[in-house]
Image (cartoon, grey):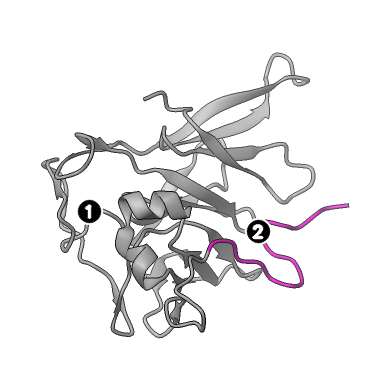
Amino acid sequence: MPLGALPLEVRFLHEPTNENAFVGCALGSAIFRIHPDKKNPSIQTATLSASIPSKRVSGWSLPEMPALITDILISMDDRFLYVSCWLHGDIRQYDITDPSNIKLNSQVYIGGSIHSESNIQVLDQDHSEIPALYVKGRKIEGGPQMLQLSLDGKRLYVTTSLYKQWDQQFYPENVRSGATMLQVDIDPETGKMEINRNFLIDFGKVSGGPYLAHEMRYPGGDCTSDIWI
């Protein structure tokens, strides 16, 4: 699979004079940096910043499972890039203070297809077992999908549904029980992420549900909808 397969989200750094942006490629499970070409600044070029290897698996529809990057987000201070991997189940946080040399800084798992209670076995020798996630007694189905970050960079919110047809194929229980919205706390000094076990919005229990939650927005503007004038 080409690393650039199925580019989805494009996020520009918030600093208005900074000419860098990042693109998440879903099937390629890669992050590219978009920036002016060094030899001809009037032309934009793409440089690979990070790639997430597929995992060799059994019990799944294919012999290899991509991470499937479905959303990316940049903190308001342009310090961190957050990446959701819907199939592998992890949220990755990259330090992008040097956009040309990003580094993985923190990682948490929220559901996904390869946890200890799934029927899928990871064959890679370097794979460590990932426990299924329960929050307030609710098993989290689906995987980390859409992301939203508080303006102060301390709270990352995540929903677990992609599209109903995809949910039905990869996470049928997510459709039956409804999606969830969770909170990940961010250490303001180190950036380390930790799942908040006291926060859960269960869209399976909302009147008229179950529902499949997707986008999240702050009424006064947020990290994905700000406009610099």
The residue that appears at 32% across and 57% down in the rendered structure is 171
Whether the magenta-drawn stretch holds residue 100 is answered as no
The one nearer the camera, 150 or 98, is 150
Which percent across, then down, holds residue 14? 71, 51
- Where residue 95 sits: x, y (%)? 50, 50
Tell me: 206 left or right of 110: right
The image quadrant where one finds the N terminus is top left
Instruction: Say if residue 110 shows up in the picture.
Output: no
Identify the residue at image location x=73%, y=19%: 43
Q: Residue furthest front?
A: 208
Answer with mark 1 or mark 2, whichever residue precedes in sequence.
Answer: 2
Q: Which residues are magenta?
A: 214-229
Q: Secondary structure at mark 2?
A: loop
> Element at badge 1?
loop
Q: For mark 1, does the 10 Å Cα neighbourhood hold few (<14), some (14 to 19), or many (20 or more) residues?
A: many
**Prevailing secondary structure of the magenta residues:** loop
Tag 1–tag 2 contact (CB < 8 Å): no
Q: In the figure, is residue 150 to the left or right of 133?
A: right
Q: Which quadrant of the figure has residue 124? A: top left
Question: Which residue: 49% across, 42% down?
Answer: 102
Q: Amino acid at mark 1?
A: Ile
Image mark for residue 77: 2
Q: Position of residue 116 (x, y in %)?
A: 16, 61
Mark 2: which amino acid? Asp
Q: Which residue is under mark 1?
A: 114
Crowd class of label 2 (few under 14; some 14 to 19; many from 20; radius 10 Å):
some
Q: Nearer the viewer, mark 1 or mark 2?
A: 1
- Residue 117 drawn above or below residue 25: below
Residue 224 falls in image quadrant: bottom right
